Image (cartoon, rainbow, N blue to C red):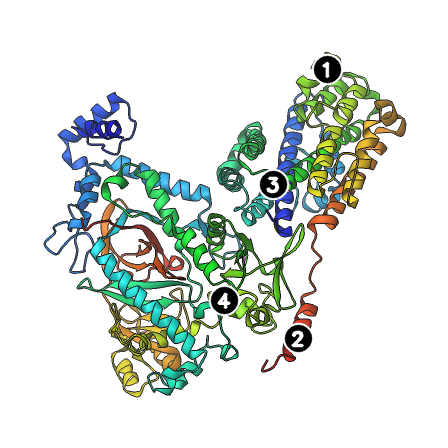
């Protein structure tokens, strides 16, 4: 260990290619000479000399152009990298993702075209103090949401006490009145939550939305880290990055914790819509890491309100399903009749308490974009605390005063449909044409309950490799929160980046990419 | 360890399709090379050379839908890139990968990555270019990938029930493909019986041996002289050669017995019964029996019975009865109505 370190240090002396690549001495000497003569050939300097923060909050550079303390080690390390090396690493990472088939299928493409989710090599870094703050805020939020769901599916005190108007709950598309009065194991409804966070121009973290149904993307958190480690094997120890690889273990623990009572040996499985789903890779990846089966609807059958897998040795009962199918498609006898993905009778098995679904049916009544508006009130009501992480200020089109404001300021606002996700059904006022704005004006008037509006936030930016130079690109952040015996948040998450210049939309379906996210042990 | 029926099914087809792609590559490759040795390459002779390949797989009608004549280009295209042909190399690889995708948590990363690589290779424009300029290179790539997959499987995949299904698929398909290969020879011979025993005949039998990498092994056992009955004996009844039909059936029988949990000579389902029976019949056969029955007839019968094993296996173990979705929904809905507050 000591020897190895000394070796690395020795190499570093006068060596501009500090990545530790086993390059022949001759070549290395040549590189060094070349770099000594042309210091500008060092990638970092060359590519950053024109870097502009343009008045946005930049994750890496403070307003005065100085590198923020928690980025310094990375900066030092990368500044010694040559352009060539950096590009080699970039290509190697892309190729490895491609080989592994870490791809998503482009919907609506009959050729079945597959793409890798573009991956940017410059990691996003979060210092430990900031992370602790986020952990507290996210824990508070998921706790309140689970209280709220329990309440809505039991006594509805929050409505009775006039904190949330009943009409909003009743009209939420994902509210499942048929589950009112049904108990779920340990009173937990959302077991896995992906909460989208952004930072505004002051660098304050804000919650953009809660994904409490079937949030996806966590496999990228793990895969991106593996890719980074392959590309920069020497970087991690020194940078003090907390590992993320424990996520599958924590997820399995959470699933087992909510198994129907009294089971000694718990059988869990991942329920996938199948190989054509864009997140299919993730379903397999998680199942494999947890050592459980990936099942499709057709692998399951319900008998006596119990759920069974069809195996080569006969039927085998399942206790917990980590389901990645939306409520609507779970059970054709209850929800969408045309769904071939689901399992007839599954809902009855859930109601009978013989199988647990994670997340529960009906959690969508908490992550509806209108309900989002009420989350700070839920926190106050159930926990008697002020929200640690704030919401983005939000206007409800169904409120008279808010509606007036929305109509008056539409070109400045971001408008979102209450029940859509993936960046669809959205208007970014400042970027939209006049016609688009007017189209939305009509849509909002026609169905006020279905729309909210928010001021356009200047999302924070992060240096990102774009066509040979580094430029600031807007980013967001999705940590993954597990709610089992306790709340567990893997130190990291998915940082998504809007690769198109100026774009605020980070979704993979709309030209987004991702970055590895480093949570540090310390603050530097 | 439990094994989902659907997963077993995918494992089985995954290896069947890879094996099929490999054998098709072998067959086309060797026939392309054989063409170089033929004299008087007029149209009819070229057709006579290629048509048997299509006939012996029973795809002539399908072929005629796409092409007017059987010649080097049309036949190799049909067997290589035609997506309308479910057994073309491209179709096989695409289907194999689709199956692998469904079970990628059950196969090793190494196996998955190689299948994925092969998939991207056969779909790429560069593969088409390589194929056009140097077909041997292209087919070698297919063969080697298949062999690599077997090696990777051997050294990285867990030996559980899923593994047995991979083996069942592989040996079943290989038995079928070797059968086709020998039978192609019958079709080639058919139009010009005067060639029997002549130089061309020997060349063609040598080509058959090469297609299944049996050239050296044959010479090792039988010496330099290539005799039709020796080649037939070698490819059908050899106990040592890993692509002979007997060899494949012996493995097939062993895998089915492992899955069913019975000892040698016994069976617990129809598939096991058929496999055991066919194996023992071959065990006690000689090449004279084969020629007495007529090579083509004998092979046809053998092929039918091999495919029956696959079918029986499907019904006995893999196949979970197709759920009548409408009926199931009706049944469950009815139950729900009887629940209080449903």
Q: Secondary structure at mark 3?
A: loop
CA gap, disc 3 to disc 1?
36 Å
The chain containing the residue under callout 1 comes to B
CA gap, disc 4 to disc 1?
63 Å
Find disc 1 in the rendering and name its residue. Answer: B221
- Please report the residue visible at 18 percent of the width from the left and 60 percent of the height from the top: A56
For the residues beneath circles 3 and 4, the answer to whether they share a chain is: no
Contact between marks 3 and 4 (CB within 8 A): the answer is no
The chain containing the residue under callout 2 comes to B
CA gap, disc 2 to disc 4?
23 Å
Q: Residues within 10 Å of mark 3 (few under 14, many from 20)?
A: few
In the rendered structure, find residue B160 and report the number of the disc placed on it: 3
In the rendered structure, find residue B243 and report the number of the disc placed on it: none
Q: Residue B184 location in percent, x, y?
A: 75, 31
**Does the image show residue B261?**
yes
Q: Residue B40 location in percent, x, y?
A: 72, 22
- Please report the residue visible at 66 percent of the width from the left and 17 percent of the height from the top: B216
For the residues beneath circles 2 and 1, the answer to whether they share a chain is: yes
Find disc 2 in the rendering and name its residue. Answer: B335
Q: Nearer the viewer, residue B24 or B161?
A: B161
Marked residue nearer the N-terminal end (3 or 1): 3
Query: With A62 as the anchor, is B317 left or right in this view?
Result: right
Query: With B67 as the anchor, is A362 left or right in this view?
Result: left
For the residues beneath circles 2 and 4, the answer to whether they share a chain is: no
Q: Secondary structure at mark 4?
A: loop
Q: Secondary structure at mark 2?
A: helix
Marked residue nearer the N-terminal end (2 or 3): 3
Extreme-top residue of the structure: B224
């Amino acid at each position: 260990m000591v020897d190895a370190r000394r070796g690395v240090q020795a190499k570093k002396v006068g060596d501009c290619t500090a990545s530790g690549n086993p390059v022949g001495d001759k070549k290395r000497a040549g590189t060094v000479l070349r770099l000594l003569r042309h210091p500008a050939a060092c990638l970092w300097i060359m590519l950053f000399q024109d870097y502009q923060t343009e008045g946005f909050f930049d994750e890496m550079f403070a307003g005065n152009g100085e590198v923020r303390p928690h980025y310094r080690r990375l900066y030092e390390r990368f500044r010694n990298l040559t352009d060539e090396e950096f590009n080699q690493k970039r290509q190697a990472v892309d190729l490895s993702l491609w080989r592994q088939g870490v791809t998503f299928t482009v919907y609506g493409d009959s050729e079945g075209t597959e793409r890798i989710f573009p991956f940017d090599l410059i990691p996003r870094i979060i210092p430990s103090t900031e992370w602790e703050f986020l952990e507290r805020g996210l824990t508070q939020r998921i706790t309140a949401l689970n209280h709220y769901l329990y309440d809505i599916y039991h006594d509805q005190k929050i409505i009775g006490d006039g904190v949330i108007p009943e009409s909003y709950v009743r009209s939420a598309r994902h509210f499942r009145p048929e589950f009112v009065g049904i108990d779920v194991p340990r009173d937990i409804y959302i077991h896995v939550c992906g909460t989208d966070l952004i930072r505004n121009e002051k660098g304050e973290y804000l919650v953009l939305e809660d994904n409490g149904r079937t949030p996806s993307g966590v496999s990228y958190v793990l895969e991106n880290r593996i890719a980074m480690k392959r590309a920069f094997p020497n970087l991690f120890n020194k940078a003090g990055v907390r590992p993320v690889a424990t996520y599958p273990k924590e997820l399995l623990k959470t699933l087992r914790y909510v198994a129907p009572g009294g089971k000694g040996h718990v059988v869990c499985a991942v329920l996938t819509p199948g190989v054509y789903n864009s997140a299919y890779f993730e379903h397999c990846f998680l199942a494999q890491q947890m050592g459980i089966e990936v099942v499709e609807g057709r692998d399951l059958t319900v008998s006596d309100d119990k759920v069974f897998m069809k195996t080569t040795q006969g039927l085998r009962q399942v206790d917990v399903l980590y389901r990645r199918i939306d409520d609507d498609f779970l059970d054709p006898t209850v929800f969408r009749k045309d769904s071939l993905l689901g399992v007839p009778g599954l809902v009855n098995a859930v109601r009978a308490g013989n199988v647990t679904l994670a997340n529960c049916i009906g959690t969508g009544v908490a992550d509806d974009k209108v309900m989002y508006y009420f989350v700070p009130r839920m926190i106050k009501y159930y926990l008697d605390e002020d929200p640690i992480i704030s919401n983005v200020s939000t206007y409800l089109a169904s409120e008279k005063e808010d509606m007036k404001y929305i109509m008056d300021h539409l070109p400045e606002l971001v408008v979102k449909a209450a029940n859509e996700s993936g960046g669809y059904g959205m208007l970014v006022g400042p970027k939209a044409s006049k016609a688009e704005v007017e189209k939305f004006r009509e849509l909002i008037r026609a169905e006020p309950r279905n729309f909210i509006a928010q001021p356009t936030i200047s999302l924070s930016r992060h240096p990102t490799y774009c066509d040979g130079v580094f430029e600031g690109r807007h980013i967001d952040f999705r940590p993954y929160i597990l709610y089992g015996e306790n709340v567990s948040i893997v130190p990291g998450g998915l940082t998504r980046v809007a690769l198109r210049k100026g774009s605020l939309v980070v979704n993979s379906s709309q030209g987004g990419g991702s970055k590895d996210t480093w949570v540090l042990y310390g603050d530097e | 360890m439990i094994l989902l029926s659907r997963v077993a099914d995918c494992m089985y087809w995954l290896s069947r399709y890879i094996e099929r792609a490999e054998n098709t590559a072998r067959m086309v490759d060797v026939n392309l090379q054989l063409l170089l040795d033929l004299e008087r390459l007029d149209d009819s002779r070229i057709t006579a050379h290629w048509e048997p390949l299509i006939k012996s797989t029973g795809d002539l009608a399908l072929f005629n839908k796409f092409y007017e004549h059987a010649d080097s280009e049309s036949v190799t295209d049909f067997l290589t890139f035609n997506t309308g042909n479910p057994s073309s190399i491209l179709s096989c690889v695409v289907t194999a990968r689709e199956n692998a995708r469904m079970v990628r948590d059950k196969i090793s990363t190494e196996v998955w990555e190689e299948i994925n690589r092969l998939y991207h290779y056969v779909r790429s424009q560069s593969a088409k270019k390589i194929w056009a300029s140097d077909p041997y290179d292209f087919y070698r790539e297919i063969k080697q990938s298949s062999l690599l997959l077997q090696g990777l499987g051997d050294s990285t995949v867990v030996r559980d029930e899923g593994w047995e299904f991979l083996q069942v698929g592989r040996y079943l398909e290989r038995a079928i493909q070797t059968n086709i290969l020998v039978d192609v020879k019958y079709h080639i011979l058919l139009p010009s019986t005067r060639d029997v025993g002549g130089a061309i005949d020997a060349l063609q039998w040598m080509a058959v041996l090469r297609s299944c990498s049996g050239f050296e092994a044959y010479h090792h056992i039988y010496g330099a002289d290539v005799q039709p009955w020796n080649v037939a004996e070698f490819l059908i009844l050899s106990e040592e050669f890993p692509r002979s039909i007997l060899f494949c059936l012996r493995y097939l029988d062993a895998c089915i017995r492992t899955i069913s949990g019975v000892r040698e000579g016994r069976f617990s389902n129809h598939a096991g019964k058929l496999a055991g029976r066919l194996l023992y019949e071959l065990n006690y056969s000689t090449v004279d029996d084969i020629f007495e029955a007529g090579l083509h007839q004998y092979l046809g019968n053998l092929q039918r019975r091999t495919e029956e094993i696959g079918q029986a296996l499907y019904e006995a173990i893999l196949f979970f009865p197709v759920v009548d979705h409408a009926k199931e929904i009706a049944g469950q809905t009815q139950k729900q109505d009887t629940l209080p507050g449903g």
